[in-house]
Image: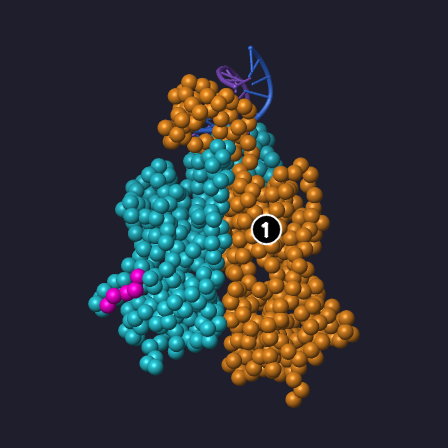
Chain colours: A cyan, B orange, C purple, D blue
Amino acid sequence: MANIDDVAKAAGVSKSTVSSVFSKKRPISKEVTELVLKVARDLNYKPNYWARTLATKETRILGLNMQAEKVKFSQFHLSLMNGVLQECYENGYQLLVNTLSPEFLKDIQNQVSSPVDGEILMDPEKKDSRLNRDTISDRPTVIIGKPPEEFEHVISYVDNDNVGIAFDVTTYLLDDGHEQILFLNAPNHRTVSIDRELGYKRAFLAKSKSHSPELIVYKKENLTSVEYGYQTTLKMLREHPTITAVIADTDKMALGVYRAVKELNLSIPSQLSVFAFSDHSIFAKEFDPPLSSAKLNSELLGSEAAKLLIEQIQSKHKLVKRVVIPGELIHRGSASTVQKE
Amino acid sequence: MANIDDVAKAAGVSKSTVSSVFSKKRPISKEVTELVLKVARDLNYKPNYWARTLATKETRILGLNMQAEKVKFSQFHLSLMNGVLQECYENGYQLLVNTLSPEFLKDIQNQVSSPVDGEILMDPEKKDSRLNRDTISDRPTVIIGKPPEEFEHVISYVDNDNVGIAFDVTTYLLDDGHEQILFLNAPNHRTVSIDRELGYKRAFLAKSKSHSPELIVYKKENLTSVEYGYQTTLKMLREHPTITAVIADTDKMALGVYRAVKELNLSIPSQLSVFAFSDHSIFAKEFDPPLSSAKLNSELLGSEAAKLLIEQIQSKHKLVKRVVIPGELIHRGSASTVQKE
DNA sequence: CTGTTAGCGCATTCAC
DNA sequence: GTGAATGCGCTAACAG
């Protein structure tokens, strides 16, 4: 592959002239420009990405970092990524999906600075190894989700109002007469579980009712969402037959709940109401009965995060911003008032 | 941010020693190694990705290129990407999703060599601007799907046996007594439409029957899959009341078919059989009735493509390989024998 | 086992 | 408007 020198010689001009033709950072006469471009085309020359980066310190690449163990994207991540990509597309950035395993990164050979201009961190955890003062001061960073306590005022983030959403869902169920509400929360180490749990508890408090602590359980990482929803629902309904409603973390988990309910020969919603934090699937309507859920607008989460990040990359000031994406309860019939026996 | 010189000076060694400590490309004594690492940690030093790349010509980044207009990932692309990411994860590569618009790339400033070691091209078209002799000789490239005719023997690719799958689906319907089979094919400019159409036609030929050419239609790019499936089914069923079966390109398109059928007050499968090329959604079962479809194993498409690409990057020989991912018909009840009236 | 030197390919001062 | 020199931060080839 030809380099800038080859082109310069072949065109009979200097390197800097060729450079300027491509970067447009200083005016070059029309004749020279055309000559250089023609020669470049003939030689199949394109400026070397990494050499340019080394000189300019800019890659025009955004990073999307998800926890390595969770290298499987869910529907939620997918549509979120579509939002990020949309923004990348419009601003001329490419997206680098980070998939390096912790073990891989432990090797010294692989300890390298990141090749991105900025990074979006997904699925933050209470103790998140990706976050420390050094990394976030090294490069612009935006979190999707709730940052750990100590980073709340240090780093920009985009999140749903999970407290509010959980409050609304729980209040809705309480208003329908439910008291024993099983809460299949996100994994305990994820920050999102804090907010949702808070909303759940506040809803009880607001009605001066008390919740049963044993009805709040957290997803285990070693099970799939469907499997966890299935097994836990079976177990909890047997141990606590007074449960009349379930709040599931995701629609996949709710699918597990549906399966358990079928196996127990119960019916939704007459004997058990189900609500999920999720609108990820275009097939949500295909649940039988259709699943009531919260619309999280994950695509917006993605595009707003990308916007924040690009803004942060391009501006001189390090402002800490927060964007709250509204959620909305969508009632599709899987939850109803308690049936008196 | 500290650079290699700072570390070398602070540790009282040479640059190349520091370099070797991090790259492990030549042995360094234990004492020196530890000293250097300690100093590096104190200075928060990490080797600069771009500088290293410039010197080594290796980025350890794979590219995933989808057509820019289709910047929205579907379920199919998602699970495919999960396959790619899995392979990246295991081999220490990162994945760069290419989202640069054609207009953006027309600007000379943005004409830059690609920052990847190799690239996976998705959704190939009959005339595909991404493909030409120069680009594929510049860097390793693997296609997911059927390459355009002239690249068939020049470039490695991973694909389903779409001819066979379409043949099987069509044969299955013909065996059930269907004769007027509406085929909602992929967009005409996509190479996949060729193979599927071929399979459809061959199935008729094998039974010495003739198909009605007007029953093969192609998705229009300006409509969503659901919308296209819906509108076209309505229109075609009105114009051709003798149609008893529909083959849809994707499950989303089939969802449109279901909606049209509902609107026409018909029932599936007694009055219309439906089959789709797709198993993308975990909710496929939730179609009412459940949708019969072909399992394409898209995750395997992704991981095999990544394997091919990594192999090609790491080997000296440019071998042209092809991997065929098996498909499988999954019968779930949306297709049945023709009901005599 | 370690140090010295010379690039990698481009952008960016300066001069003119 | 264009050219010459310097540097970005690292690796690699050559010494020793």
SS majority, magenta: loop
Mark 1, Cα crowd under 10 Å, few <14 / some 14-19 / many 20+, is many
Picture coordinates of residue A283, whole percent (x, y): 48, 68
The residue at 44%/49% (across/down) is A66
The residue at 67%/66% (across/down) is B166
Is B165 displayed left or right of B263 in the figure? right
The answer to whether residue A93 is seen in the rendering is no
Quarter in which the C terminus of chain A is drawn: bottom left
- Along the line of sight, the residue nearer the viewer: B112 or B287: B287
The residue at 44%/76% (across/down) is A266
The answer to whether residue B280 is seen in the rendering is yes
> Element at badge 1?
helix
The residue at 69%/48% (across/down) is B321
Disc 1 target residue: B303
Picture coordinates of residue A95, whole percent (x, y): 47, 48
Is A330 displayed left or right of A50 in the figure? left
* Magenta region includes residue A211: yes
**Where does the magenta region start and end?**
A209-213
Picture coordinates of residue A153, whole percent (x, y): 27, 46
- Along the line of sight, the residue nearer the viewer: A325 or A182: A182
Q: Is residue A262 above or below residue B53?
A: below
Is B152 displayed left or right of A185 in the figure? right
Q: Amino acid at mark 1?
A: Ser
Residue B90 sits in quarter: top right
